[in-house]
Amino acid sequence: MVALAYTVAFEGIEARLVEVQCAVTPGIPAFSIVGLPDKAVSEARERVRAALTSMAIALPSKRITVNLSPADLPKEGSHFDLPIALALLAALDIIPQDDAAQTVALGELSLDGTLVPVVGALPAAMAAADEDRTLLCPHACGAEAAWVGAANVIAPRSLADVVRHYTGQSVLSPSEPGEVHGTSSSRDLSEVKGQERAKRALEIAAAGRHHLIMVGSPGSGKSMLAARIPGILPPLSPVEALETSMIHSLSGLLDEGGINRERPFREPHHTASMPAIVGGGRTAKPGEISLAHNGVLFMDEFPEFARTVLETLRQPIETGEVVVARANAHVRYPCRFMLVAAANPCKCGYLSDPARACARVPQCGDDYMGRISGPLMDRFDLRIEVPPVAFTDLDLPQDGDSSATVAERVARARDVQTARFADHDRMRVNADAEGRVLEEIATPDADGRDLLVKVAERFGLSARGYHRVLRVARTIADLDGAIDVRKPHVAEAVSYRLSMAKEV
């Protein structure tokens, strides 16, 4: 008779159900695992054997065959240890087979039977809830998986606890969700001296999730401004928190099983590889753009990133998802993020300072910024120059609105957008608006339209640029509490679009 248990195989953030079949039959003693396992899964038989031996359970002198179905789906990772052990215990009649067949399990086994935490407990809990099954996972993963309230989560510390639970000797209580971590940014926007235009651009970008690029000489405050963006962003909604946490769960980034309500702020170094940024590697893990889903991706020294890395950003920015192609599968990750880039105007950084600029001015500036292709630059809604601040201004008292004040205005604008796009699944903020919806919500008044038409004709705005100006104008109107988009809103949006280039 074949005993059954269930586990999952990950394809992106999707957890596909895998049936673990175990048969103990007469024949030459052997323990084999079939069903397209990788090296880590194949080695599970030795960990399972040692864990059972530590519990004084000896394997019979028979042929043990474990099949992972569907057999053509690649199985990767050490989380297959626990479901294989569970199916084997059921096949040996040590635990009830009916209980094992109603369980989705994942976890790694130590040689002494202790359960080691694994990644992906949250997506696995989602899959278990969809199948109306119990999730069995290591104790350290229980708080994370319990956030899916529809699934009953049992989190033992060892394989011996599993046996005692299923035999009724010591029944384990369901796990409770971990703590909710809130926003705790201590960097305040009022600490930035001067740079009022840049602060305004940050507020607009945060309100509508618009992409922003800042160009300025070294020490002008670009990184300092970017570091204060988390303090003005609203917390994640419950839906957004679950989406983001599922990605972070696959990467092992959830802290003690807690769901984080703070929006991600990722800042990869400019030496990062393409798989690190867009995702990939041997197991097609999510990259920085997916880890920044519903948050911010800050790329400092933007032109210093490899050209191939920068160009791969173009499609994810437009579609909000990235596909990691492999020979046997295409893994899809969501990546709706706000891209914030910072760059020096040239290699030496002092293009506008005759006393400090190099001998190649202005050609060095054209060459350096030329590393950013036109199509990629066209995807930035807001482009601002960040001038240097005089050292005499650093002793001035703090001025401007605090992060809390700006965050209130951003939150009000986001609430307006949430209500506006309530009936649209793929639209949450103004940056997502497209097609007929964009025309309905962002068509300016007569004066604003005349201004936009003149700008488009004079500077050769692309169709993408034209629509991005409309989206930014709609966000500015939301910040002002205006129902309609008017000429001042369009004028401000255009000023950010044209501030760094003669042609767009």
Image (spheres, rainbow, N blue to C red):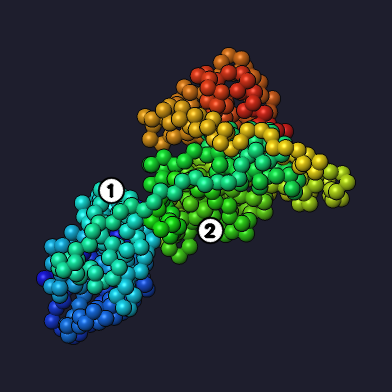
Task: Tell me if residue 21 comes above or below residue 311 in the rendering.
Answer: below
Residue 459 or residue 493, whichever sits in front: 493
Badge 2 amino acid: Ala
| Residue 100 can be seen, yes or no | no
Q: Is residue 268 left or right of residue 192?
A: left
Q: Is residue 480 left or right of residue 172?
A: right
Q: Nearer the viewer, mark 1 or mark 2?
A: 1
Q: Is residue 130 left or right of residue 466?
A: left
Q: Is residue 356 left or right of residue 221?
A: right
Badge 1 amino acid: Gly
Disc number for residue 437: none
The residue under the point 35% across, 60% down is: 141
Residue 75 or residue 100, whichever sits in front: 100
Q: Which of the image's four quarters has the N terminus?
A: bottom left
Disc number for residue 276: 2
Q: Residues within 10 Å of mark 2 (few under 14, many from 20)?
A: some
Q: How many marks?
A: 2
Furthest residue in direction left, as rendered? 1
Question: Residue 14: image x %, image y %?
Answer: 35, 53
Question: Residue 71: image x %, image y %?
Answer: 27, 65
Task: Tell me if residue 482 comes above or below residue 250 in the rendering.
Answer: above
Q: Quadrant of residue 249?
A: bottom left
Q: Quadrant of residue 86?
A: bottom left
Question: Residue 340: image x %, image y %?
Answer: 60, 44
Furthest residue in direction top, as rendered? 446
Question: Label 1's element?
Answer: loop
The residue under the point 76% across, 38% down is: 396
Question: Residue 35: image x %, image y %?
Answer: 27, 68
Label 1, on which residue? 149
Q: Which of the image's four quarters has the C terminus?
A: top right
The residue under the point 84% across, 50% down is: 358
| Residue 223 can be seen, yes or no | yes
